[in-house]
Image: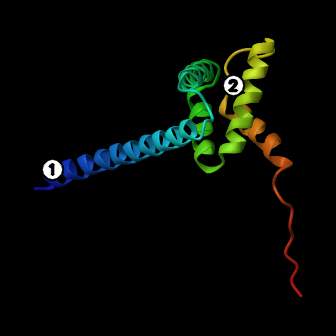
Amino acid sequence: MRAGRKERRKEGGTARKKLALANFNFQVAIRKQAIIMNGGIDPNDFQKMRQIEEMKKKILATILSKEAYERLARVRVANQELASQAELYLLQVYQSGKLSGRVSDEQMKEVLRVLSSGSRPDFSIRRK
């Protein structure tokens, strides 16, 4: 009986992930269609953009440790602008040849901390 519940839970989680991915892909398709209809970007440009994104992912997967890559993915969910800045910085460092070895999770934390230090508002709470 318990094994059946676990299997259903597992299948439910997988189904939710598939549904979320399908929803995301649907939203992306709608955005692309809106851009095309508004005379924005040529459909061929989407293919180029997709190829560039795939190249970025491959390069990032090779220069980042598994933990750093996962951290970047989590940051992308929470703050897409910060993740884009970090990706751009890492790709520039890689392209310039200044990168020796893989970027560790600690190094990724430092990159994210430096990039986010200017954008975070400072505030203090004073009690009377």
| 87 up-or-down from 126: above or below | above
What residue is drawn where x is 24% and y is 46%? 11
Tell me where residue 36 appears, x and y as whole percent.
55, 35
What residue is drawn where x is 78% and y is 20%? 93
Compared across the picture, whether 53 is left or right of 28 comes to: right
Mark nearer the N terminus (2 vs 1): 1
Q: CA distance from mark 2 to mark 1?
A: 41 Å
Asked where in the image residue 42 lies, by quadrant, the reply is: top right
Tell me where residue 28 appears, x and y as whole percent.
49, 41
Residue situated furthest top in the rendering: 97
Q: Identity of the amino acid at label 1? A: Ala
Asked where in the image residue 65 lies, by quadrant, the reply is: top right
Looking at this view, is 114 or 47 the one in front?
47
Label 2: few (<14), some (14–19) or many (≥20) C-alpha neighbours in 10 Å = many
Q: Which residue is mark 2?
A: 103
Tell me where residue 7 appears, x and y as whole percent.
19, 47
Label 1: few (<14), some (14–19) or many (≥20) C-alpha neighbours in 10 Å = few
Residue situated furthest bottom in the rendering: 128
What residue is drawn where x is 62% and y is 50%? 78
What SS does tag 1 mark? Answer: helix
Tell me where residue 53 appears, x and y as whole percent.
58, 25
Compared across the picture, whether 10 is left or right of 99 comes to: left
Q: Identity of the amino acid at label 2? A: Val
The quadrant of the image that shows the C terminus is: bottom right
Counting labels gives 2
| 18 up-or-down from 44: above or below | below
Looking at this view, is 120 or 35 the one in front?
35
Asked where in the image residue 68 lies, by quadrant, the reply is: top right
Q: Which residue is mark 1?
A: 3
What SS does tag 2 mark? Answer: loop
